[in-house]
Image: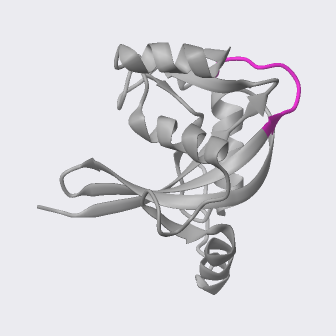
């Protein structure tokens, strides 16, 4: 079995006590609610990934962070190292290519959806971590703080982006 680990970026966007979630249009998780985000592309910085994923799923965003990083298992032999950014909407929210819908949801709304198994669990983890405060590397599978991520990224060799044909 081939073992896979990918870097992903997620955006937690909060406004007036509500969180912006998308309803996934495609697999994995088609029809489930999640914070905006996705896989990092070759040659892309973490910040570029977060901004691109936001733009593709909900429209232009400003990104701050990463705030923290955690690892979550997708399935046996496949894991994501999720880099969480704080996002701010620039303009109007509009469901993009990867989203069937984009909605501002209260914690009560999210809880109701979760009770019906309609929320991706890693997204609950992102919202909860924001609610409970600064990431503690010893709690909840948090692997790196924001400062540690920056140091790791600075040490990586720069990869060239694929040329679009």
Name the quadrant containing residue 102: top right
Say if 77 sits above or below 149 in the image. Answer: above
Q: Between residues 14 and 80, which one lies in front from this camera angle?
A: 14
Q: Residue furthest right?
A: 91
**Image position of 74 (left or right of 16):** left
> In the image, residue 94 lies at what x, y percent?
72, 17
Residue at 58%, 82% in the rendered image: 156
Magenta includes 95?
yes
Name the quadrant containing residue 136: bottom right
Residue at 68%, 27% in the rendered image: 19
- Would residue 9 be visible to someone looking at this image? yes
- Would residue 100 be visible to someone looking at this image? no
Residue at 54%, 26% in the rendered image: 98
> In the image, residue 142 lies at what x, y percent?
49, 62
Q: Residue furthest bottom?
A: 155
Residue at 41%, 31% in the rendered image: 120
Specify the segment rendered in magenta. Answer: 88-96
Name the quadrant containing residue 154: bottom right
> In the image, residue 33 lies at what x, y percent?
49, 22
> In the image, residue 81 lies at what x, y percent?
45, 60
Q: How many marks?
A: 0
């Amino acid at each position: 079995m081939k073992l896979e680990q990918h870097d992903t970026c997620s955006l937690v966007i909060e406004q007036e006590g509500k969180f912006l979630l998308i309803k996934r249009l495609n697999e994995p998780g088609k029809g489930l609610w999640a914070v905006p985000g996705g896989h990092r592309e070759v040659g892309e910085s973490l910040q570029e990934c977060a901004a691109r994923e936001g733009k593709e799923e909900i429209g232009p965003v400003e990104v701050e962070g990463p705030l923290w990083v955690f690892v979550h298992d997708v399935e046996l032999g496949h894991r994501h190292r999720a880099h969480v950014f704080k996002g701010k909407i620039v303009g109007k929210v509009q469901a993009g290519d990867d989203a069937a819908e984009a909605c501002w949801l209260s914690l009560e709304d999210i809880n109701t959806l979760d009770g019906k198994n309609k929320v991706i669990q890693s997204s609950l983890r992102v919202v909860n971590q924001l609610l409970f405060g600064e990431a503690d590397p010893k709690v909840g599978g948090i692997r790196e703080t924001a400062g540690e991520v920056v140091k790791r990224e600075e040490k990586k060799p720069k990869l060239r982006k694929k040329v679009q044909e």
